[in-house]
Image (cartoon, grey):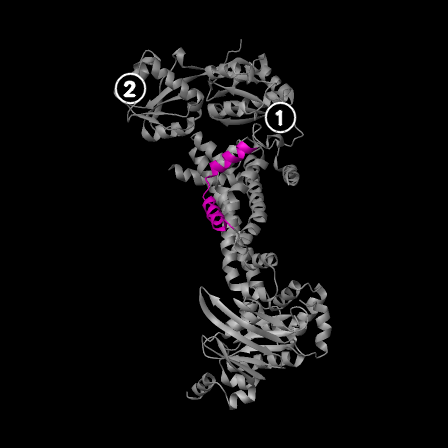
Amino acid sequence: MENNNAFEVALSLLLNLDASLFQIVALSLQVSILAVLIAAVLGFPLGAAVALWRFPGRGGLIVVLNALMGLPPVVAGLMVYLLLSRAGPLGDWGLLFTPSAMIVAQVVLVLPILAALSRQKVEELLGEYREQFVSLGMSRLRMMPTLLWDARFALLTILLAGFGRASAEVGAVMMVGGNIEGVTRVMTTSIVLETGKGNLPLALGLGIVLLTLVMLVNAGVYWVGELTRRRTG
Amino acid sequence: MTSFNASLQASSALLPPPALCFDGVTFSHEDKQLLGPCSFNLDGTGPTLVMGPNGAGKSLLLRLAHGLLAPTQGRVAWSGEGRPRQAMVFQQPVLLRRSAVANLTHALAVNNVPRRTRVKLAYDALERFGLSASAHTPARVLSGGEQQRLALARAWVLSPQVLFLDEPTSALDPAAIKAVEAAVREFHQRGTRIVMTTHDLHQARRLAGDVLFLSGGKVREHTAAEAFFDRPVSREAQAYIAGELVE
Amino acid sequence: MKKTLRLILAVMTSMGLAQAAYADDYITLASTTSTENSGLFDAILPEFKEATGIEVRVVAVGTGQAFEIARRGDADSLLVHDTTGEQRFVENGHASERVDVMYNDFVLIGPADDPASISEAQSASEAFGAIASAEAPFTSRGDDSGTHRAELRFWENAGVEPDGDWYRELGSGMGPTLNTAAAMDAYVMSDRASWVAFGNRQNLTLLFEGDEVLFNQYGSLLLSRDKHPHLKHDLAEQWHKWLVSKQGQQAIADFRVDGQQLFFPNAK
């Protein structure tokens, strides 16, 4: 009974183009997408580097990266909070309770996923390509962009995994953003708020909106991926 | 490595290809000696066909010569100054997930060839190897024979002074084999030293200038092609050729 | 490296991600989830903004966390309902002053059939005692919040040490605790505001109210200029003073849900 309400609520939210909902959706997308992009710029080269170079402690680093994929969001949020708090080392930057802090926290969450999974993919490709690359005279540094580009379709899926993690989490953004109305309130923290108030249909409705959003993003990326794959193989 | 542009001009004047020298080379892996000691000189015009039964160490020898592996003992040396420009074609062509022409321009980009030259050289090579129509096809979608020709085209654009080929036709049908052998001859005519392994006696007869025969990780014989096929000196080579005939 | 990072973050923020740009005057107020959930801020903050042009950004967390945020200098002002804790805060020098602002009250909620018969109790102590004797299921917030601390005082005054399977400590905010009580058909102590705003009542109903001991006093704290010189003290002081001003107090009294007044201004 209440669940039927939720679908109706979700639909009416979307159709009425509720202004505050729009702002919350826009902020959610901005934060998560930016976080994933930044994490990719940092994480993909990191993953490729770990795949390419041998160094002491490499095995340990791989284990740590893999383990950090399961970093609880609230723990990540807590760590970033302590970092950005006025009482903390980066307090002077005044970033706490702003969307920037939320992006930082989500980068912390998503980076291990992108690095660990890209490392595995690049290592796999390296097994296939290494002899040919050495034959062509490529240095390991030179191999990095070639391997990453060759892995692009797998990396796209890995990117989506990161985006899924970022858009679904609430612990980190709640902690460092403060769920301030109109400033740092996003879909997931809204859902927690409405659940806490006992407005379950509204909370579920928001949940459906969030899922729809994530579905659309995934569909869009898949479609783009398929188009380019057919074009260039 | 000699500079690309200098060699580009050099290769148009048919200089003799650099000579390869193996001096007491051995290769061991996990305390097991797989190859050697080997000592020989490849200083003729070639093409040199490296032959021998499976497990003789032909692929290892090629990789040691090309520098993909380091010898456990002994040394690999080249005549002339520095390490000559080389390329290698593998049994299974290793191509990037991009179009055929992009594979070629990539190889040129790696060697710091400016963009416009890259494109021209790439298309010229595609034409030479009969792949113009497939320029924008994803390389991995091409047939086995086409892929191997593409790998040869890639080697061609780099103007190598030495070309190594590791059983390049063992996975191909007769028409493709013919095309690949024609390509190898083109390299040879341009003055590239050819070092190629094969288990196909007939192919060896067709292509070889001289034969390097291996068995059990050691060089048993190194002779001119005619001499080798008519009157093999070593016991192992005799057995090998006899084995081929007894089908 | 630090400079580059700072630049990137500055670019990101200025890309309009903070909808409320740094151009506006604003303060960060640490308060509690129960206060925010009641809807009080939605009612009175616009009036404050109109009067002073200052935007108040509310970070609503548990009472313990609110104190911690203020202690760390991450908020410009503090509004909570834990008088003992607030006084200690001033004594420790984190705040320069504390004033009474308003009170709401706690109510006892329970299953409609009222197995412990608390609706007949004459005092809060009697009601709490009845629940303990009947060993009726009771959900406690258990999160060291102002509400939770108050609840523990009531048990103590009733001469009871709540222990046993019937006493469920959840470690949750008011809303989730009410949700769980509704699901378990259990007794729960809630602030009136949260109860009135609560949408998922199921079989629960208000059973006991009115005893003066159940009044829940709110205090506003002016944070120390010495300990945290970077805070927006002037703006925070305007807020602090407005709360106890005639206009502020009236705004609090005017706030109603379902016709009910939830907060009672009592500034001196």
Inspect this view and state whether residue A17 appears.
no
What's the residue type where badge 2 is placed? Ala
Residue C205 in percent (x, y) is at 35, 23
What's the residue type where badge 1 is placed? Tyr
Determine the residue located farthest toward the top in the rendered image: C268
**Vertical placement of C267 versus B211: above or below?**
above
**Residue C2 sits inside the magenta stretch:** no
Determine the residue located farthest toward the left in the rendered image: C134
Q: Chain of mark 1?
A: C
Residue B90 in percent (x, y) is at 54, 72
Q: Residue C208's mark?
A: none
Q: Which residues are magenta?
A: A56-83
Q: What is the quadrant of the C terminus of chain A in the image? A: bottom right
Magenta stretch, main secondary structure, is helix
- Which residue sits at x=65%, y=41%? C4
**Residue A74 sits inside the magenta stretch:** yes
**Vertical placement of B121 versus C207: above or below?**
below
- Front one among C69 and A191: C69
Q: Chain of mark 2?
A: C
Q: Which residue is mark 2?
A: C132
Residue B94 in percent (x, y) is at 54, 68
